[in-house]
Image: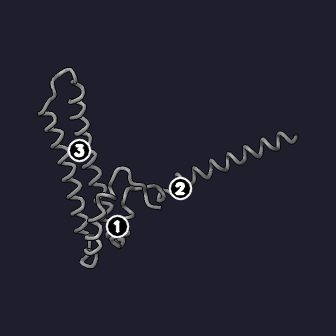
Amino acid sequence: MKKSLIRNGFIAILLLSNALFIYKWWMAPERRHHGPRNEIIEKLHFDEKQVTEYDGLIRVHRKAIESAERNLQGQKQKLYSNLDEPFSDSLLQEILKVEAKIEHIHFNHFKDIEKLCRPDQKKYFKALNLEIAHLFSPGKKPKR
């Protein structure tokens, strides 16, 4: 009798912890990391209309970056799939063009964010300029 009570208690604890995990994962998506989106909104003091417009910019930006990154992966695949051949300077130039395109996409995205700012928010954007490289660095952890 005592063993079944302990077993049932253990099962109840496991079920409860799983239910809590599922709730946190599915029912609270705002707690997931969305890149520096929320940090930028906070630093620039965006209002609701600006946040909506910014979310649209993010969607367009992500789509452009994903397309360019697929192209980059394709070019790199061509380069490395021919290791028996001499190094291809022309493929390297294509890779560099795509990487430059990615940087242009990022740069234009930030210029579009600046256009969302009201005149009183321009000073916040100017301060944000000093942090942009850090905000988007690959190893950056989300702010909690």
Q: Residue 49 at what x, y percent from top left?
A: 33, 71
Q: CA distance from mark 3 to mark 2?
A: 33 Å
Q: CA distance from mark 3 to mark 1?
A: 25 Å
Q: Which residue is mark 2?
A: 27
Which mark sits nearer the N-terminus, 3 or 2? 2
Label 1 element class:
helix
Q: In the image, is residue 30 above or below residue 93? A: below
> Which residue sits at x=28%, y=59%?
57
Residue type at the position of mark 2: Met
Q: Residue 33 at what x, y percent from top left?
A: 43, 55
Q: Residue 76 at what x, y percent from top left?
A: 23, 34
Residue type at the position of mark 3: Ala
Q: Which numbered dot is residue 51? A: 1
> Which residue sits at x=11%, y=33%?
90
Label 3 element class:
helix
Which mark sits nearer the N-terminus, 1 or 2? 2
Query: Label 2 crowding class (10 Å Cα cut-off): few <14, some 14-19, many 20+?
Result: few
Q: Which residue is mark 3?
A: 68
Hey, which residue is sitting farthest left in the picture?
A: 90
Residue nearest the viewer, comparing 37 with 52: 37
Residue nearest the viewer, comparing 83 with 4: 83
Label 2 element class:
helix
Query: Label 1 crowding class (10 Å Cα cut-off): few <14, some 14-19, many 20+?
Result: some
Q: Which numbered dot is residue 96? A: none
Q: CA distance from mark 1 to mark 2?
A: 22 Å
> Which residue sits at x=26%, y=72%?
117
Residue type at the position of mark 1: Val
Does residue 2 appear left or right of residue 92 in this picture?
right
> Which residue sits at x=28%, y=75%?
121
Question: Are circles 3 and 1 on residues that touch, CB within 8 Å?
Answer: no
In the picture, the quarter occupied by the N terminus is top right
